[in-house]
Amino acid sequence: MESDKIIDFQSLTKNVGRFSLREKTCLIPQMNRIGGHLLAATFRAFGIHGKVMDTYKGLDLGVEYTSGKECYPCQITTGDILHFMKMEEERLGDEFDPGDYIYFMPEADGPCRFGMYNKYQRIVLDSFPKLKNLKIGSLTTKDGYSMDGMFEKQQVRDLRKSGYFSVVVGDVLDRLLWRIRPYEKEPGMTDEFIERSMHAMEASFETHAADKNFDNILDKLEEIIKDGTKIIDPGIPPKPLIGIVGEIYLRAHTHANQDIIRVLERYGAEVVNASIAEWVNYTSYDKLRDAKTGFRLSLKQLRFGPMKKHLKDILSYGGDLFYQEYRQRQTYKRVRPLINLAEDHKVAHLEDILKEKDLFNFDAGTEACLSIPGIIQYAREGYNGVINVYPFTCMPSTITSSIVKPLMNKLGVPYMDTPYDASSQPGREGAIRTFMYQATQHFKRHGRKNHN
């Protein structure tokens, strides 16, 4: 593929947005491996050819076509799509048609560079004449990741419910991995088991997601968890418990964060990472919160038209949040009697933590709304240390760090920032070892939360 530098700015609106996925291959960037594959399987259940792209194999392309001022996930995902298209062209030859694909890249509103990824990547793709027909499918936090316009209207709600459920199950499998790997009987057993389990859950979602037969999917999940508990060596004593928060992509993408969870485990930790479902719940909660604020203001001003719109949004986003939290509770209720997995914090509870001492405000938005109270809640629950994972120069995570560092010092709980970019920092592992020494001392003095 050869690039030219002519930019068609109309393409930013014409070729980025909601497009029908029928008869197309929907390309899903890999963030957390398990969740991405389960989401792709859910798409396939509804007749959409969902495919998770390989990741990190095109980082050289991502670096070449970015300036370095973008945050790290932009470099990675740009490289992923360029590498995939290059490999498809080599595989298909004259039959290669970029118009057969839709590249799935959501966005967020607010003061985060993520909201501009798909626009910037549109400019990059348009610089390759052959890739101008590759459309970018985008969902946005502005409407709580509504899928209207990408699927048949009668299927949107069912697909949204099944898609969210796939996210929750992906979180559970991730947490199962982190729960049993530090205590496995033989090295490598857990990784092999989780890989097989992911493919088994893919098959289950492809079979049952379209019918919303979630009980059958949960039955399969229970079966997997029961098998997973057999990998645990009961003779290995509990280890210091470390919580992770931060920017959603970096903390979930093992290549981008240099497999920090495995490094922590190597130095004696058991780790719990913030979930993907937590972010989805936050987007619904935030839109519900905005609608309530708008309704109160419209009521005060007696503006009945906006009142009606805000009331409709309250019912819509409130229903979404109620369903999402219900589905989470149902899932963890099935799995927790089998193994002690950490559950998600309710977003409303996290906001209450911020209000206690006016630490931050949801009006400001961004993942700092989750990370700051999430760190405090980890400390209150008896975790022995917390790590903040984020792209170098990430504003929300830098804000988080500035607020929580003095709080964690006061609480006496070890805390560490781990910003990442495309380089490798030679002192990073030494810093993690020091952090784990502190966490181990905290564990010896205070113990940790319950362990089954």
Image (spheres, grey):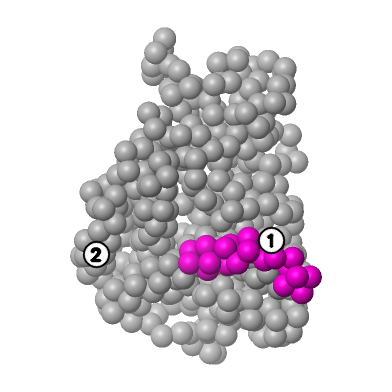
The furthest residue to the top: 94
The label nearer to you, 1 versus 2, is 1
Identify the magenta region: 298-320
Q: Residue at x 54, y 52 (%)?
A: 145
Q: CA distance from mark 1 to mark 2?
A: 42 Å
Q: Which residue is mark 1?
A: 305
Between residues 233 and 221, which one lies in front from this camera angle?
A: 221
**Position of residue 260 measured from the top left corner of the image (x, y, whole percent):** 53, 58
Q: Magenta stretch: residue 421 in it? A: no
Q: Earlier in the sequence, mark 1 or mark 2?
A: 2
Q: Residue at x 62, y 28 (%)?
A: 14
Classified by dominant secondary structure, the portion drawn in magenta counts as helix
Under circle 2, the secondary element is helix
Q: In the displayed structure, would residue 412 be above or below residue 187?
A: below
The C terminus lies in quadrant: bottom left
Q: Find residue 222 and report its image quarter.
A: bottom left
**Position of residue 299 measured from the top left corner of the image (x, y, whole percent):** 72, 72
Under circle 1, the secondary element is helix
Residue 131 visible in rendering: yes
Between residues 306 and 340, which one lies in front from this camera angle?
A: 306
Q: Residue at x 79, y 70 (%)?
A: 301
**Position of residue 113 measured from the top left corner of the image (x, y, whole percent):** 70, 47
Amino acid type of the residue tagged 1 in the rendering: Gly
Q: Magenta stretch: residue 308 in it? A: yes
**Position of residue 110 measured from the top left corner of the image (x, y, whole percent):** 71, 54
Q: In the displayed structure, would residue 113 be above or below residue 272?
A: above
The furthest residue to the right: 301
Q: Which residue is mark 2?
A: 215
Q: How many marks on residues?
A: 2
